[in-house]
Amino acid sequence: MSRPPEIHVLENETSLANEVADFLAWTVEETLRRHAQFRLVLSGGSTPRSLYRTLVRPEWSQRIAWPRIRFFFGDERCVSPTHAESNYATAKACLFDPLGIPDTQVARIHGEEPPEDAAQRYETAIRQDFTIDPTTVPQFDLVLLGLGDDGHTASLFPGTAALEEHTRLVVAGSSPTGVPQRVTMTYPLLNRARVVLFLVAGTKKAAMVRRVLDEDIRRPTLPAARIHLTEGRLLWYLDEAAAAALTVRRRSVPHHEE
Ligand code: 6PG
């Protein structure tokens, strides 16, 4: 049975980004004591930009062992890697380029290819990176996720076939808004992670945050509520605006207390 989510609420988007940067730095340090590298999955959309801006500041850029981190994406829009809507383009401009992270450390989803081809190619790339037997689900060290105001996360949108994928790790998906064609990691892969961290900010998300966190995880209906880890830690990092409608008890224990 998965553990309940740990909910951290910070005053504003700046303090939220700093707290998540601190958690990331701590988790990387702890993991690299035992493993050669750290595999991080980035979320899409606009919320991560404030985290990226924080991570490239010397306080964090000089603390984190970037050369030992491999970067992946939880989903991608089916556009070119230079398109303004590309999650890779956002990460490249705001994180990879400022930190001098080479392409060899980044496994991007080839959104410019036909979606199904891109999905199969990405699943193969993930499996090759982990060099594990084909029946084992790879375990990422940390997965960042966002929350859409319809309850989607990654590109797992309500009512889409991707929600019902229980075998493949990556599939083609569809979105009712924005770029319609997507490629997304699936629940088998996301729920296997050591840590999943939802980073959510802003008033617009408050109603959906409450619905997701108040939902009965035994009968979840919203895509984001169906993220519950087989053995890892599920954390929600929110600013006060996004947490404003919450009724569940907020745990404000320091992040290093597992
Ligand atoms: C995407 C994301 C998606 C995103 C949420 C929140 O590609 O759009 O992966 O799941 O995290 O839609 O997006 P914002 O941060 O822009 O609100």
Image (spheres, rainbow, N blue to C red):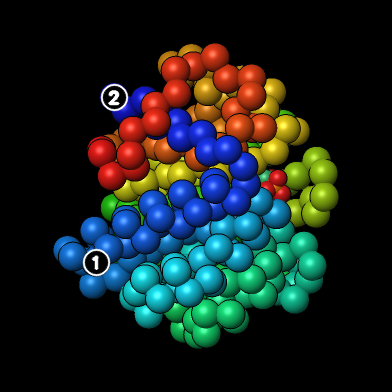
Residue lying farthest to the left in this orientation = 34
Residue, x 37% and y 80% (percent of image)? Answer: 67
Q: Calculate the distance from the C-alpha at mark 1 to the C-alpha at mark 2.
A: 27 Å
The picture places residue 226, in percent across and down from the top left corner, at 50, 30
Q: Residue 246 versus residue 41: which sits nearer the camera?
A: 246
Q: Is residue 41 visible?
A: yes
The picture places residue 151, in percent across and down from the top left corner, at 65, 31
Q: Residue 77 versus residue 246: which sits nearer the camera?
A: 246
Give the residue number, with chain letter if any, for mark 2. Answer: 1
Residue type at mark 2: give it. Answer: Met
Residue, x 37% and y 71% (percent of image)? Answer: 63
Q: Residue 59 appears in which quarter of the rendering?
A: bottom left
Q: Secondary structure at mark 1?
A: helix
Residue type at mark 1: give it. Answer: Leu
Residue 22's tag is none
The picture places residue 64, in percent across and down from the top left corner, at 37, 70
Residue 225 higher or lower than 184, as above or below: above
Q: Nearer the viewer, mark 1 or mark 2?
A: 1
- Crowding around mark 2 (Cα neighbors within 10 Å: few <14, some 14 to 19, many 20+) is few
Q: Secondary structure at mark 2?
A: loop
- Quadrant position of the C terminus in the picture: top left
252 sits to left or right of 186: left
23 sits to left or right of 75: left
Q: Residue 161 versus residue 83: which sits nearer the camera?
A: 83
Comes first in the chain, label 1 or label 2: 2
49 sits to left or right of 226: right
Give the residue number, with chain letter if any, for mark 1. Answer: 32
Residue, x 46% and y 35% (percent of image)? Answer: 8
Q: Residue 144 versus residue 10: which sits nearer the camera?
A: 10
Q: Is residue 185 visible?
A: no
